[in-house]
Image (tube, grey):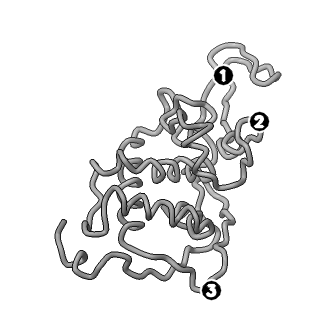
Amino acid sequence: MTWALALLLNNRDALNKVQQELDIHVGKDKLLVIESDTKNLMYLQSIIKETLRLYPPAPLSATHEAIEDCTVDGYDVSPGTWLIFNLHKIHRDPHIWTDPFEFRPERFMTTHKDFDVRGQNFELIPFGSGRRMCPGISFALQVLQLTLANVLHWFEFETPSGEAVDMHEAPGLTSPKATPLEVYISPRLPASVYNSTT
């Protein structure tokens, strides 16, 4: 979620577009975005896919072991060899992704609209694939989608300095930001809505 907010703060057109989508499909008179609302939030879903493409939860896959002789990209691999896939590199491959380093959620509504993050498209596998894919993928996606939708629905965002958010990554097994995300938030819904329970 941190990466999604950081990307949106650096891409105000996308932030405005997703908030307009929330206004249309949820409305400014309703406090909570609920699960049944999310099926209509196609741009939000594209933002999540694009965020997971650029900043997968872990930049490297789980370890896989070759069970027979095989060739991977011209390299002979013997049985018993451990393989680790660089997801960060796969997700930014210019042979697959136009402008691979750019935040372009629209790609998941046009050229890559059939791509899913559930391990079926090997060009986009932020949670892995096959038997060793993340067992919590459904829960993670649901929580991310609902939390991000509600936060974007409730608040306007500004950076303290008014400058672009630093997008450098820290080293590690996961993909943390090198610097904390600092934002000012203000309400974007009418005050009466925040006092309601729906």
* Amino acid at dot 3: Ser
Q: Is residue 7 left or right of residue 23?
A: right
Return the residue nearer the eye: 83 or 45: 45
Mark 2 touches mark 1? (CB < 8 Å): no
Q: Give above or below for 51 relative to 81.
A: below
Q: Give above or below for 24 relative to 120.
A: below
Q: Give above or below for 165 relative to 131.
A: below
* Amino acid at dot 1: Gly
Mark 3 touches mark 2? (CB < 8 Å): no
Instruction: Judge depth for marks 2 and 1 and give the one in front.
Output: 2
Q: Residue at x 66, y 22 (%)?
A: 80
| Residue 80: mark in rendering | 1
Q: In this figure, which residue is indicated by the disc labeled 3?
A: 161
Q: In this figure, which residue is indicated by the disc labeled 2?
A: 95
Q: Residue at x 18, y 73 (%)?
A: 196
Return the residue nearer the eye: 168 or 9: 9
Q: Quadrant of residue 179?
A: bottom right
On the image, the x and y values in percent for residue 57 come to 54, 51
Q: Residues within 10 Å of mark 3 (few under 14, many from 20)?
A: few
Q: CA distance from mark 1 to mark 3?
A: 52 Å
Name the element at disc 1: loop
Q: Residue at x 51, y 66 (%)?
A: 16
